[in-house]
Amino acid sequence: MTGLVASIIISIFLSGTLSLLLGLINGLQLVFHLPIMNIIVPGNVSMFFEIMIPIVMFDLLSTIGFMTEWFPLSKSYYKAHNHGLDQISNIGYDSYNPVLNLGTIGFLLVLYLLRICSLLPIKCFNIFSLGIGRNFFTKTYNALFWGDFILIFINGYIEFLISAILAYKAPDGSPDDTDFVYGISIFSLTVSLVLIPILLLWMVACHSMKTLNSSRFQQKWGMLYDTV
């Protein structure tokens, strides 16, 4: 898993051997997620993880902290009922609420959905029938379906999976025991465990290397296999 923000910046401004940098970041992110697998780390290492995880994961919004104000009871409830999960809390998963656990990448997913909501009415009513802005609309539409969607879920695969499992396990009576949280959990699990693997198998089984390397195919589906 590579950081979504880093992928975008490097893909725009840099190229070539710096793709190796993303591989190093990928490995570092996996190391920082070792506490998820119940691997005990010393207290000083756990504290270091807590300080560095927003930087390693490029979670810019978690450093601002304004999202916590939207769900003021989520983190306090989680800490009160999960004393044995301090290591997981230290790497940013300190709530049952998927919005708080996803952080920046969840915000980017919301922006993606807003872009779809703004483009679909234009598509339905054929506003660009006279040709004004048609090229821009076509490129944006092709990027949304499904390049940007795959980019978000491939680069945030671990975050979506962990956040979905935590949300699904929200106990009855908790502040996060809502249909909204449950719906996000089901959506994230479905995409992570069903849709993405099916798309990967479809890539391998149904397309030749010539098709995979074509520019038109890469624009729409390239993020599915470029970052794997």
Image (spheres, rainbow, N blue to C red):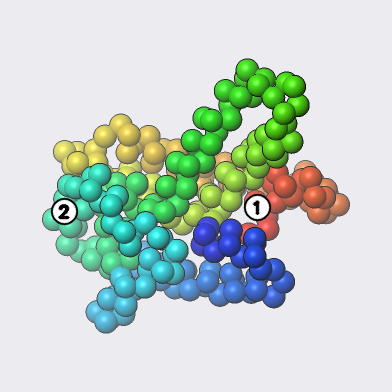
Secondary structure state at the residue bearing disc 1 = helix
Horizontal and vertical percent position of residue 128: 69, 24
Residue 124's mark? none
Residue shown at the point (34%, 46%) measured from the top left: 99
Left or right: where 121 falls relative to 187 = right
The image quadrant that residue 70 belongs to is top left
Mark 1 is on which residue type?
Answer: Met
Vertical arrangement, residue 130 with respect to residue 189, above or below: above
Frontmost residue, 164 versus 216: 216
In the picture of the structure, the residue carrying the numbered disc 2 is 76
In the picture of the structure, the residue carrying the numbered disc 1 is 223
Q: How many marks?
A: 2
Residue shown at the point (67%, 20%) measured from the top left: 126
Vertical arrangement, residue 83 with respect to residue 119, above or below: below
Q: Residues within 10 Å of mark 1 (few under 14, many from 20)?
A: many
Left or right: where 219 falls relative to 78 = right
Left or right: where 136 falls relative to 24 = right
Q: Residues within 10 Å of mark 2 (few under 14, many from 20)?
A: few
The image quadrant that residue 199 belongs to is top right
Horizontal and vertical percent position of residue 56: 44, 69
Residue shown at the point (38%, 53%) measured from the top left: 103
